[in-house]
Image: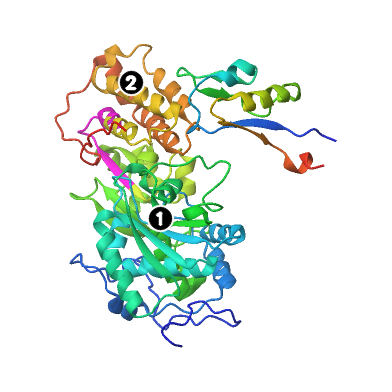
Amino acid sequence: MTATSLRISSGSGDPQRSTRTPPVGAERLLLGLPQSGEPVGLIQHLDQWGTLPLWRKSSFIDELDGSGLRGHGGGWFPVGVKWRSVRRAALRRPVVVANGAEGEPASAKDRLLVRQLPHLVLDGAVLAASSVGATEVIVYVPSSSVAGMKRAAEERLRRGLDPCGIDVVAAPDRFLAGQESAVVNTINGQPSARPSFVTLRTVRERGVNGRPTLVQNVESLAHVSLIARFGADWFRRVGTERSPGTALLTVTGRWPEPRIVEVPLGVRLGDILGLGPDATRSIAGVLLGGYGGGWVATDEAMAQPLTEEAARDVGSSIGAGVVALLPHDVCPLLEVSRVARYLEGEGAGQCGPCVNGLGVLADALELLATQPGRLRNGISAIPKLCGLVEGRGACRHPDGVARFVRTALRVFENHTSLHLQRGPCHSTAPPFLPLPPARRRSTR
Amino acid sequence: MRQPHYALVVNPVVCDGSGVCAELLPEYVRLDPWGYPIFQAGEIAPHLVEHARRAVRSCPRLALTLVKLDTSVARQ
């Protein structure tokens, strides 16, 4: 095989599996991650994982179906189904976008992947391109990772490793930067981080430059690169039937600093974190899935298996793998109010119900946190406002805010009653949930 | 043979809350506190479909689309 030969053959026959030994434990993507924080270069990467085996287009998508891999960007949509839909839609040559935007302030795992393991991501993206018939990969990452990603792409180009071109585009530093249609709009040169109304036409049909577009999260692509090497059966050795494999989590509030861990899906959160039922003594509530996810009562969160299905059953989502443990010494309502104000400012400013509703909602939450006596009709206005924004935006931003707020009212019901009866608490603890520094509001 | 079923979809990016749709089709459209339309859940009653078409044509922002809910039946 020459260095420039296509990664995916059109002939028949079984793919050559990797000659490397597959990882046995829960550590897969992060196996061999340099503690120094340095990126893994191409030579080191190939030394650890070997070259990508040859796969036929359709048989690799079949293998993905068999692996049961679901999207780790937050949607948990079956990856094989998504790739096949892009292939089918393709009257024009599709484009593949590796989405590493990670606008969620409480998540850091995609940043880790693009910064330190760029070739694991690029392997998956190149394989996606070959599988859906694309000749162009666009890597969409925060501006701080653009130079590193370009270096990684050049290393591959020098070796003639890939049958497709790799471009790198900077993602704006916005909450909605990673939203699928916003990704496409930014790449197409439109104002940053504005989603489109995709109910009637998705980016899979018409995306980058009007071409069918596959937007796939970088962690999903990293898993793809290992499935290509070790197969679906290996992938399923950990995890559950419906949620196989491992996931990267960003955990805040368990250790002095936020930490990124790789865990098998389906394991109880309490076991992952080393916390039992008495966790309720130190933790007031658990936020799963970040600011578009939802709050879960501590005892319930610790006992439930970590899968998207289980999280949805309790009205939350594990989203992009955010777990935040809220300590008792901060006021949860103040935290919720701060985040709601931030999310209002992060709206794209396009849809009437979201533009108007999120502001009024943030006002009401601020009153509840700081001057509950001034809330007319108690808190009943808050769920009503959630109802007025849900399902009424071009994207799911207002739905995510509503879920964040509704679940908070449920989990912190006792605390809410205390505010209404006795007034705000006077906590002196510093703010807990991570938010980026306040941005000067553009007048647009 | 069943009649095709229809519903209205609004593109919220384009809609600027003129309220024309609620004017023309009050049985199916109400307005939120800021003047943006909220549609009744489910299909438009058959006798209102013509009014819905008029609302689609009359929207100053062309933000409305009438969609068939049951294409397999409607194709006949």
* Residue at horizontal 53 percent and vertical 59 percent from the top: A241
**Picture mark count:** 2
* Residue at horizontal 25 percent and vertical 54 percent from the top: A259
Residue B28, above or below A42: above
* Residue at horizontal 42 percent and vertical 31 percent from the top: A402
Q: Residue B44: horizontal and vertical position, in percent?
A: 69, 26
Residue A326 is inside the magenta segment: yes
Circles 1 and 2 on the same subunit: yes
Residue farthest along the left direction in this orientation: A428
| Chain letter, disc 2 residue | A
Neighbours of disc 2 within 10 Å: few (<14), some (14-19), many (20+): many
Q: Which residue is mark 1?
A: A267
Q: Which residue is mark 2?
A: A364
Quadrant position of residue A151: bottom left
Measure the C-alpha gap from mark 1 to mark 2.
Answer: 38 Å
Q: Which residues are magenta?
A: A323-337
Q: Residue A152: horizontal and vertical position, in percent?
A: 30, 70
